[in-house]
Amino acid sequence: MTERKGNISVNTSDIFPIIKKWLYSEHDIFIRELVANATDAITKRHTLSRNLNVEIPQGSINISVNKDNKLITISDNGLGMSEADIEKYIAQLAFSGAEEFVKKLKDEGAEDGQDIIGKFGLGFYSAFMVADKVEIESLSMNEGAKATKWICEGDTEYTFTDSTKETIGTTIYLHINEESAEFLNEWKLSETLRNHCDYMPYEIGVLDEMKPPQKPLKEDGTVDEEAPAVAVTPTIINETRPIWKRDPKELKDEDYKEFYRKQFPMDGDPLFWIHLKVDHPFTLEGVLFFPKFNPMKPQNEHNIRLYCKQVFVSDNVKNVIPDFLSLLKGSIDSVDIPLNVSRSSLQGDPNVQKISNYVVKKVAEALKVLFKKDREKFETIWEDIHLFIKYGCVSDPKFDELMRERVVYKASNGKYLTLGEYLEATPEKYKEKMKGKVLYFEKEKSDAALKNQLLAEGLLAIECDDHIDPHFFQHTETKKIGEETLQFVSVDSEIGNLLESENTTEEDMKIKDLFSNILAPKKEGEENSLDGNDVEISKITGSTTPAYFKVDEQMKRFAKMAQSMGQQNTMFPTKKTLVINPSSPLIQNALKIHEKGGNEALVEKICHHVEDLALISSEGLKADEKELFIARTQDLMQELTTLAL
Ligand SMILES: Nc1ncnc2c1ncn2[C@@H]1O[C@H](COP(=O)(O)OP(=O)(O)OP(=O)(O)O)[C@@H](O)[C@H]1O
């Protein structure tokens, strides 16, 4: 046997230890790199053979593991390599790539180094992360090629020897080092493969050579004890035709759901999905799913898996697609997302920009179609998708332009309306007063009585949540809906302006004074009561609501935004005004008792009770307020029952 020695042409002699150290954190990527190389080799053989018009076997990759020999073997039936090829592509190019990596690492600093590793690893070189010694045995598809074997023990020297390999393709032998012994476990190896190679285009079989021959199974699934034991066969770990590679026309809803369930087993069915396919000016295929929103589950950014030619690359799509799309789940496959640049420079890449714009546009278009063609379904899933859509509108102007007029709101009549529809639904007689205004009520806190009073007049109010809506309102107010600029106003701050019916009388003023004196007494020398709430009157004829709280719109917004950003409510103390309705019979009675004299204690109780009822209807009572309220309720009921006896 002849042996030929060579030297890897790198200047940095300490390249091996440096790379080993840096790559240590993610050293399972070696499997992805080597299987990706095998995949490329098979594809190349297919392409070349098609041109030569020769029959070739179906592409496959076989990985076997032998714990006793501390050996992992990766075989492919790709185009193979001659000695010259190995010399050129492995010994020289692959290693010079590694050298470049070390240089980059030194130039860009440690953090970016990690980033680079995570993105693309180091190709063939990553084998040395897990192996002390690596051998390549290969037979090239070129006519008359001689099989060869290359051996390298993790330093800059290597040796070629002859080989007896008879089938075209390449086998990589990894003599696994001590620290990486875990990969000699078939389960661990298969898991790692599934993680990185779950949708590779050629079948990947895994075989544990340690497994003894086993008796075959009978048709009913039980072991056939009579039959002789046979050698175990490889287990296929991947699906070669993932859903995004298939023609949407040949797929049924169930196929998408099944794919989703496999990827996200804890999730239940997706709400709907978008199949992406584009060839120009970049290539991209993928399926994005709208998941059911689960407030109990923290959102994470790793729900979209990025592939390059079916090779898993990353589940971190940050800087590839806008943040708000990371609320979706699924897979994107594109060769046009550059992998060999640091993450920070991804955003500036023109292809990435185009891809990002394309995905945003497709998602918005799919939502537009759903809105137009199946409004019922759109409304059914609205509560699950509204957060995503609003977040998208606020953060992405292009998405906003496409979606703004399709955002719907749950109105107080139970229907979902766009802002355009809301404006149209305003009764003619209120059109002038309401001009450009959109009434809203807070889901948890608003006074139902006020909402119903407005509804009785045909005036609708939309529901607002605590999280995204304050931001979204602010955003929408800076834009146009149709021809109009809108303003969101809360029911409590607006109801007086809308429904206040008559001019203030002397009696109304007496009511105001009565309540002010008891609930917000002025301190000596003060114009107004500074602590406590202000008291106002607003006469709403026909309404039995005695009083409600009004909060300044801007203050309310500030407080909500601060709250949604995790700040304490106390940062923005909101000043509230207690609005008394002199039309309410209860209020009128209170004045009469007061004017009659002799039972000031009861009048006081009524005033405080009216205030507490207004509080309960809006935001609720605090612990100390609750205690007083309960004690007072007991007193009042006792007085009432005594009267009734
Ligand atoms: N199994 C294989 N069969 C045939 N050729 C191979 C095989 N593995 C590696 N090669 C050759 O060696 C070259 C270097 O491989 P390496 O993995 O280092 O880099 P790469 O695949 O070109 O790039 P990347 O950094 O994306 O992995 C390949 O381009 C290919 O020509």
Image: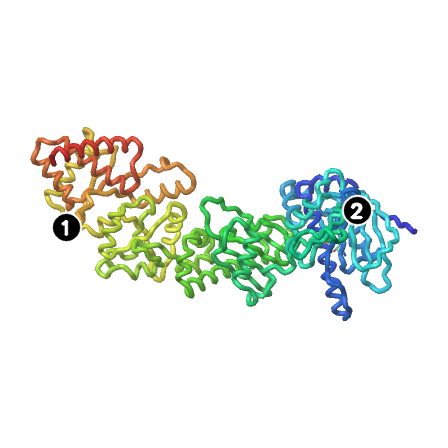
User: Which of the 4 quarters of the picture holds residue 169?
Assistant: bottom right
* Mark 2 beta carbon near ligand 1 (under 8 Å): no
Label 1 or label 2, whichever lies nearer to me, is 2
**What is the secondary structure assignment of the residue under circle 2?**
strand
Point out the residue furthest to the right here. Answer: 1
Say if residue 65 shows up in the picture. Answer: no
In the picture, measured across the screen, residue 566 lies left or right of residue 484, that is right
Given residues 105 and 279, the one toward you in this image is 279
Given residues 521 and 294, the one toward you in this image is 294
Given residues 476 and 423, the one toward you in this image is 423
Question: Residue 332 got which mark?
Answer: none
Point out the residue furthest to the top here. Answer: 524
Horizontal and vertical percent position of residue 385: 44, 54
Question: Residue 502 got which mark?
Answer: 1
3D distance between C-alphas at marks 1 and 2? 93 Å
What residue would you read off at disc 2?
134
Q: Is residue 612 above or below residue 404?
A: above
Say if residue 546 shows up in the picture. Answer: yes
- Tell which quarter ligand 1 is in: bottom right
Q: Residue at x 86, y 63 (%)?
A: 144
Q: Is residue 360 above or below residue 625?
A: below
Q: Name the quadrant of the C terminus.
A: top left
The residue type indicated by label 2 comes to Val
Crowdedness near tag 1: few (<14), some (14–19) or many (≥20) residues, C-alpha within 10 Å:
few
Horizontal and vertical percent position of residue 405: 39, 60
Horizontal and vertical percent position of residue 472: 39, 51
Given residues 201 and 422, the one toward you in this image is 201
Q: Is residue 517 above or below residue 414?
A: above
Q: Earlier in the sequence, mark 1 or mark 2?
A: 2
The residue type indicated by label 1 comes to Glu
Q: Residue at x 20, y 45 (%)?
A: 545
